[in-house]
Amino acid sequence: MSNKVNAGARLDRLPIGPFHTRVLWLVGLGMFFDSFDNTLSSSVLAAMLKSGWSTLQLNSIFMSATFVGLTIGAALAGLLSDKFGRRFAYQFNLAIFGGMALVSSLAPSMQWLIAARFIMGIGMGAEYVMGYGLIIEFVPPSHRGRYLGKLALIGGSGVFVTAVIATFIVPWIGWRPMFVIGGIGTLWVWWMRRHLPESPRWLERVGRHEEAEEIMRAIEKEAGISTPLPSSPQAAASKEPHWVPLSTLFSRAVIRRTLLAIVVNVVCLFGSYSLTGWMPTFFVRQGMSVTHSLGFTAAMMAGWIAGPLFLACVSDRMGRRTAIMCFAAVCACLGAVYPFLTSATAIIFCGFLLVSSVAIFLTLGLGMTPEMFPTEYRFRGGGVAQMFGRLGLIGSPFIVLELFNNFGIAGVVFAISGAYIVIALLIMVAGIETNQQSLEALEPEEDGDMEGALPQTASRR
C-alpha cells in the first residue's frame, strides 16, 4: 500500500454534503451538552444554597473544582488526541462527563458532588478542544469559517436551553434532574458518535495508511465520488510517521504561534466570562435593577445565538485574521462604554451587541487556534492554549475584584478593552491568515524560523 494517501488534499476538495452535516451535528451536540452541564451551575447552586443543602463556601469550592477540572481536561485532550487518536479522545471525554453527570445527580452530600464535579470538569474541558479541532480537520477550507460559526451556534444554544429548562425544573422538581438531563443527553451523543470516523489526516501522519485510505474511500463514497480525488499541485508531500514531543510547541519554529495561541485563548475566555459575568454586578452596585428584567436576560442569551449565526455568514468572506481584529476592536469599544450607560433600553441593546461580539471573538479565537498547528501536535497545541485560558479563568474573579476595588468600574472595563486591542495588534503583526487555506499549507517550517514561515503563510491571503 502506498503511503501517499493524501488525506488532507482529498478532504479539502470534497464537495460539502451529508457527511459534513453529520460531523457538524455529532460534534456540535457534544459541545451543546458541554455548555448545558457547564451553565447549570448557577441555577443548581442557588437552589442548593436556598434549601440549606450547601453553603456559600462549598459553592465556591464547587466552582473552583469545576475550573480546575476544565483546565486539566483541556490539556489532557490534546495529549490523548495526538497520541491515541481523535476518536478515542472524543469518546473518552464524553463518557467521563456524561457518566459523572449522572453520578452527580445521586450525590449524598455537597462534598461528594464537588468530587464528582471535578472529574466531570475534566471531561467538559476536553470537549471544546476536540470540537473545534475535529471540524477544521474534516471541513474544506472554503467552508471552514462557516462551519466554525455553526458549531458555536449549536454549542451556544446550550446556554439558552439550560436557562429555560432550569426555570421550570429547578423550582418544581429540584436541582438533581438538571444533572440527569445533561448526563442522559451526553451519553446519547456518545452512543451516536460511535459512527464518527477517525481523522484520516491523523491516521496518515502516524503511519496507519491502510486505515486512512479505507476511511477516505468511505467518505468519498458517501459524497458520491467513485474514484479518489487527485491531489492538487500544492498538496503537501507525505511525511514519515514520527512522534512529535510536546517541547516542539516551544521550539524556535513554533513558539511564536504557541504564544500567540495562548494569549488569544486567555483573552477570549477571560474577556467572555468577565464582561458577560460581571456586568450585572456592576449595574447592581450602581443601584440599577435592570439586570433582573426579562429583557436584559433575553438580550444576554440572544447574543450567544446571534453572534455565531452572524459569524457563520461572514467568516469565510472576511477571513479569520480580519474578523478577529475587527471584533476584538468592537468588543473593546462596547465593553468600554457599556458599564456607564444609564438608560434601560440602551443597556439591553448594547448588552445584546456586546455578548454577540464576545461570542464571535470567542469562536474565532478557539477556532483559529488548532488551524495554526500541524496534525501531529494540533490538539496538543490547542489543548495547551486552552489550558492557559482556563487557568486565566481561575484567577479572573480575583483580578476583576482587585481592579474594581482600586480603580472602580472604569479600571475593569478599560483593562479588558485594552487586552482586546492588544490581541488585534498581535494578530495584525503576526500576519497569519488561515482562511481558505489547507491545513497542510499553514504548517510552520520544521527546520526554519517563524520569521520565514509567517510571510509564506501571509502571502496566500
Image (tube, rainbow, N blue to C red):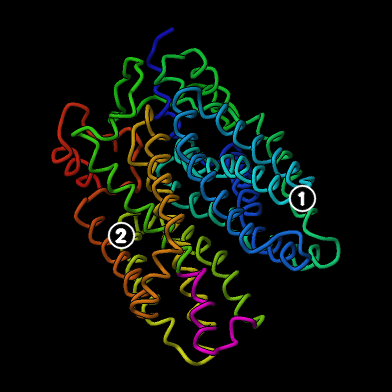
Type of residue at label 1? Ile
In the image, residue 172 lies at what x, y percent? 85, 66
Q: Which residues are magenta?
A: 275-292
Q: Secondary structure at mark 2?
A: helix
In the image, residue 54 lies at what x, y percent? 71, 59
Residue sitting at x 79%, y 45%: 106
Distance (Cα) linking label 1 and label 2: 40 Å
The foreground one among 356 and 215 is 356
Q: Report crowding for label 2: few under 14, some 14 to 19, many 20 or more residues within 10 A (C-alpha).
A: some
Of the two numbered discs 1 and 2 in the rendering, the one whose residue sits closer to the viewer: 1
Q: Pointer 1: what residue?
A: 181
In the image, residue 451 lies at what x, y percent? 14, 41
Residue sitting at x 65%, y 49%: 33
User: Main structural element of the magenta stretch: helix, strand or loop?
Assistant: helix
Q: Residue furthest bottom?
A: 343
The foreground one among 433 and 102 is 102
